[in-house]
Image: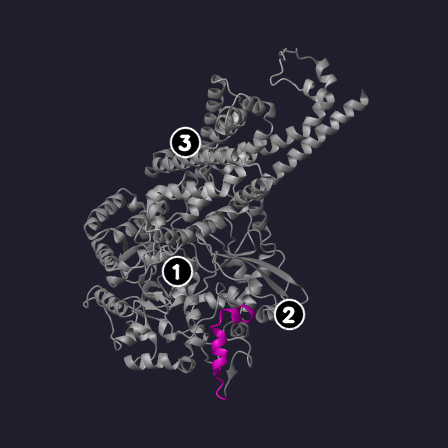
Amino acid sequence: MEEIVTEARPLKPPVKRQRRRWSWNTVKEQRQLIYMSVPLLAYIILFAYVPVWGWTMAFQDYKPARSFGEQTWVGFKHFQFLFTDDNFMRVLRNTLAMSIINLVLGFATAIILALLLNEIKKTFWKRTVQTISYLPHFLSWIIVTGIVATSLASDGIINDLLMKLNLIDKPIIWLSEGKYFWGVVGASHVWKEVGWNTIIYLAAMSSIDPALYEAADIDGANRYHKMWSITLPGIRPTIVILLIMSIGHILEAGFEVQYLLGNGLIVDWSETIDIFVLKYGIAQGNYSLATAGGIFKTFVSITMLLLANWTAKRLGEERLL
Amino acid sequence: MGDRKRVLLRFGAVLLLALSVTVAGCSGGNTKGTDAGTTNNAGGSEVGPEQPFEISVFLGEAGQQPTADNKIYKKIKDELGVTFKFEFLAGDKNQKLGVMIAGADYPDMITADTKLTAAGAVIPLEDIIEQHAPNLKKHFEKYWNQMKDPNDGHIYYLPNYGAYNSEVSDTYYSGPAFWIQKAVLKEFNYPTPKTLDEYFELIAKYKEKYPTIDGQPTIGFEILNYDWKNWGLLNPPQHLIGHPNDGGVVVNDGVGEIFADKDYAKDYYQKLNEVNAQGLLDKEAFTQNYDQYMAKLSSGAVLGMFDQHWNFGSAVDSLKTQDKLERTYVGLPLVYDLSTKDYYRDRPSLNLNNGFGITVNAKDPVKIIKVLDKLIEEDWQKLLTWGVEGEDYQVNEEGRFIKTQEQRDNASDATWKLANKADAYYGTAPKIEGYFSDGNATAASNQPEEYQASLKPFDKEVLDAYGFNSYVDFFSPPPENPIYYPAWSVDLVEGSPAKIANTKLNELSTKYLPKAILATTTEFEATWKEYVSEIQKLDIKAYEDRINEVLKWRIDNWTVK
């Protein structure tokens, strides 16, 4: 026991990076490592780089069942259609709004729940709450939207509850009002994912050195002080990494929820980029437009990822790249 | 050293192999088309039980798999050696087809869609029909030119309905109408509402008298606006001014124009706006999906709606099974004013861009066409429509087909049908319509004595009150079809400006019309104005031009010389 404590690594090992000169000798020395990396490299080339060839479709009027040489090239026509369409700005706004709502709500609720769970002393209760809260994660969205639609119906549980509490005097048709839609989506996301998202934070919390808590106890800190000054800073690197990763997905506001819960009345609030691309791309047999939409999303993702990473670096935080 | 080199070489080889497999995989989809094209006339062994043959089929409609021991499919398997493997649509049709096309992943046979034609997914059928399918050729003889695709002159699909061998006296109307519960008509001593105002007046009076039906709140009027099934919302205006169903356009003298933004359309939606203010319209009408709609109709609580009869058939079956005959519906050909003659009911026209096509992935298209050719023979057709003689119907001394009450009940029992009817195939397959050579009607519902005998006492009472022979008599007899009719079957061509304009128009309608209907009476005007100005921004001309181009083509090519 004694030994382990003394030999524990300091938090930041003072390794000085030495630039090793590249030489055939190094290659020879590390050839086993190089062999081992070949399958992974091949995998990445095959499944991440080769498909990028398909991006050429975005610059053609792609027709299936025709060879590459037979396609007609149209330059940026599809991008132009995408960006000049009246609906595009609206769709982009919806996507960003719902994505940010999901991001903020998702992070806040998961961190709060994780902090609370961490404070529970009785393992049985902790486990029970944890299990119950992450079970919805295993339901597919189509089931969840079914549950949501039923709960929000005029004779659904939400309306019943609000009526019983005398908060409203007649049922609200939730899915017919655009202004509720983002909230509905955000709430369904929280319900489905909150428990699952806590897992990684709880794991991060368990690696915080108990000595810090003991020291805080001696200094007379109460629970809130410890949460604020030890637990939260302890999981900060995890939060930052997860945030950077999710910011890369800022244009992935989800597709199923909006598609399955949306209808003509609220299309101004519910339509996301994915649905737009489906409607005017795939559903019209216009695969080129769908590809153009995909390229746009990829570019935004990479830009946002680099931006977030750079910001994190400037702030002296942990970072991904 | 030598060892190492060999190892490196091996790794290289593996890498290269893996790459070539992917490349081959990528290009596989592209070459298939031409392969199937060249092997069209090869193969095609005879159809018979000694050569088992499986045909995979995709049906563009949601449905239920027939039971594994279904008696008709069993017969087809025993006598022809053919088994059908059905895949039913789950979810959105366009999306499913889009994914299918993107992966060139087709079954052997597929229900028609212009997307498939555009993608080159289906093979031209005219040559193999001429060579291998005498029965089909004879069946479609009269309609041969109409079946040709206006874009390239090939026949890709075998229309499932509309190829009649004689005039028929219809007793069943399957098209669009304003439907009203028989109970409402009975309550007010069988009036005949002719205009929209009279119709909603009846509904309002009935709802006031019976606020609930079987414990459920009464729904005065229902509208289905879901996915591609949105005609309940979009189509009524053209009928109200006395035009037949031409889809999104009204055709005058062979020239079509959209009606969505016209004043006669506005009148209808304004009326719906008033109806909503009266509380007659279902609050959830515009947020419901097809299943919820059918559930509401099946409950018997919906007094009326605008729909195509075939679209809610299973709800009616369900009402019959529940013994709620008075909750089933009568179709009414409403018009705006009495000076307009109703034109809902039309003469049967060929159901273009419907029915089966054979895909480029089918290994043996000739054999498939031979199977279809076999199944359109009269004996098989009798089996498919009437069923098995002695089990599902009897033949009396005069050679007339007749059913017992139990057999009739079976025929409207959805569960029974899954085990005893081959509807999944028959619905989309080419079929003989009219009369068999022995004089019996091809459908039990069109056999006059069978229809009369099958009427329940309640239906007899209703018809007697009106002095009608069948419910079809509510409609005016249809005039001769214009040559180009119907305009709704025009292929707009995927991805063309016409199609995009149509998609956008659809989108605007499904967005603004519900808004306008649910708005307060004062807001209606503003919403409508906004809707019309949004429509004017679209490339409607491209849409109308395409329709008119095809209508003209039809007039030039379909006119019997």
What residue is pinned by disc 1?
Answer: B293
Q: In screen coordinates, is B176 left or right of A120? A: left
The residue type indicated by label 2 comes to Asp
Is residue B276 placed above or below A257 in the rendered structure?
below
**Image mark 1: chain:** B
Q: Earlier in the sequence, mark 1 or mark 2?
A: 2
Residue plotted at (66% across, 63% down): B52
What residue is pinned by disc 2?
Answer: B78
**Image mark 2: chain:** B
Residue plotted at (76% across, 26% down): B7
Judged from the image, the secondary structure of the residue bearing numbered disc 2 is helix
The image position of residue B177, as x and y in percent, is 32, 65
Is residue B79 placed above or below B530 in the rendered structure?
below
Hey, which quadrant is residue B252 in on the image?
bottom left
Judged from the image, the secondary structure of the residue bearing numbered disc 1 is helix
Cα distance between the residues tagged 1 and 2: 40 Å
Residue plotted at (57% across, 60% down): B368
